[in-house]
Amino acid sequence: MNMSENNELDPIRKKLKEVLVENLSLGDIKPEAIENDEPLFGGGLNLDSLDAVELVVLVQRNFDVEISDMDVGKTAFQSINTLAKFIHDNPNA
């Protein structure tokens, strides 16, 4: 990832973190405490399969990006970085 692309992803990362904290049961976690490379599932934020379904809806609603293939979703949902890159690379998918 080059520096220009990294800067373009910053606002997406910020909004993703805010959306996660506002809409998923993450306890007292603050958006700024979520690391960009922290695993979203199976550690890190420890999201589960119900959170995955809700995350698909949240991404569609907040970023107008659809994730209709589970294989794509597994790749995109690895971390904030991978999800931000997917959103950036698939505008109005």
Image (cartoon, rainbow, N blue to C red):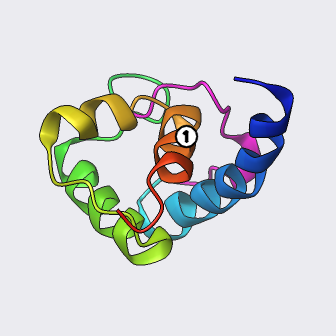
Residue behind mark 1: 85
From what the image shows, is residue 32 above or below residue 39? below
In-front residue for pair 54/1: 1
From what the image shows, is residue 73 above or below residue 35? below
Residue 84: x %, y % from top left: 56, 45
Q: Residue at x 26, y 32 (%)?
A: 74
From what the image shows, is residue 47 above or below residue 52? above
Give the quadrant of residue 17: bottom right
Q: Main secondary structure of the magenta part?
A: loop
Magenta residues, start to end = 27-40
Give the quadrant of residue 19: bottom right
Residue positioned most to the bottom: 61
In-front residue for pair 55/8: 8
Residue 23: x %, y % from top left: 45, 69
In-front residue for pair 27/63: 63
Which amino acid lies under the numbered mark 1 shown in the image of this protein?
Answer: Lys
Considering the numbered disc 1 on the image, is that residue within a helix, a strand or a loop?
helix
In-front residue for pair 33/27: 33
Q: Answer few, some or many: residues within 10 Å of disc 1's Cα (few below 14, many 20 plus, some between 14 and 19).
A: some
Left/right placement of residue 44 relative to residue 41 reads right
Left/right placement of residue 72 relative to residue 23 reads left
Q: Is residue 29 magenta?
A: yes
Q: Residue at x 51, y 46 (%)?
A: 89
